Image: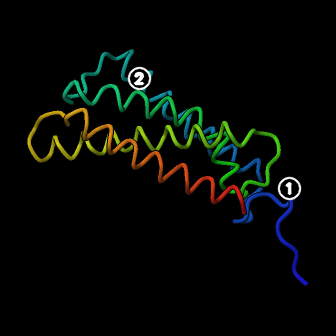
């Protein structure tokens, strides 16, 4: 009889938790290095101003959600070191910011202007709900 993965087994893909955390740390450190280089070299990113807020929030939420929610998602919610509520809230916020950014990109590509606030809010709500519910379903396994 096969047993399911336990807390000591690590993520379901067979990678040890240390490797997963190292990769997540590398992604976050890479984002921080990129943002630091852009700021210190005074590089001008040629994006319209309405892209600033969603991109900044996306970077910040990735730095917060990736180390905790990412490990829990890989383990299927079996890690007991992080509150599930924090992970679900972070994932839902990340989904909302992604929805906002996607709607902004879509309106920019279509008509070269910012998305109207109701459209942005609707996209954020839909994506936030989808990511939050999928995370909740994943954590319940």
From the image, tell me which residue sits under label 1.
7
Residue 71 screen position, x and y as percent: 69, 48
Q: Quadrant of residue 139?
A: bottom right
Query: How many numbered callouts?
Result: 2
Write down the residue under mark 2: 37
Frontmost residue, 137 versus 79: 137
Residue 109, compared with residue 31, is above or below; it is below
Q: Nearer the viewer, residue 120 or 68?
A: 120
73 shown above or below 57: below
Q: Residues within 10 Å of mark 1 (few under 14, many from 20)?
A: few
| Residue drawn at point x = 17 percent, y = 43 percent | 107
Q: CA distance from mark 1 to mark 2?
A: 39 Å
Q: Which residue is found at the position 8% from the left and 42% from the top?
A: 111
On residue 51, the disc is: none
Q: How is the image coloured?
A: rainbow
Decide which of 89, 60 is in the foreground and name it. 89
Query: In the rendered image, which quarter is residue 113 located in?
Result: top left
Q: In the visual, does 16 lie left or right of 128?
A: right
Q: Quadrant of residue 3?
A: bottom right
Residue 93 x, y percent position in the rendering: 50, 37
Residue 91: image x %, image y %?
A: 55, 43
Please tell me which residue lies in front, 108 or 30: 108
* Residue density around tag 2, few if under 14, some if 14–19, many if 20 or more, within 10 Å: few
**Residue drawn at the location 34% of the way across and 17% of the way down:** 41
Please identify the quadrant where the N terminus is shown. bottom right
Q: Pinpoint residue 54: horizontal percent, then vertical percent.
A: 35, 31
Dot 1 or dot 2, earlier in sequence? 1
The extreme bottom residue here reads 1
Q: Quadrant of the C terminus?
A: bottom right
Q: Which residue is situated farthest in the right direction here?
A: 1
């Amino acid at each position: 009889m096969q047993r399911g993965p336990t807390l000591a087994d690590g993520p379901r893909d067979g990678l040890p938790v240390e490797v997963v955390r190292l990769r997540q740390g590398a992604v976050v450190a890479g984002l921080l290095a990129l943002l630091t280089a852009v700021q210190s070299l005074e590089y001008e990113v040629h994006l319209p101003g309405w892209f600033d807020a969603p991109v900044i929030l996306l970077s910040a939420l990735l730095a917060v959600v990736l180390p905790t929610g990412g490990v829990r998602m890989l383990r299927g919610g079996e890690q007991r070191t992080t509150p599930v509520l924090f992970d679900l809230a972070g994932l839902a916020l990340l989904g909302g910011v992604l929805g906002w950014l996607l709607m902004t990109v879509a309106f920019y590509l279509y008509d070269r202007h910012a998305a109207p606030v109701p459209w942005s809010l609707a996209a954020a709500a839909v994506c936030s709900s989808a990511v939050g519910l999928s995370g909740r379903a994943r954590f319940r396994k």
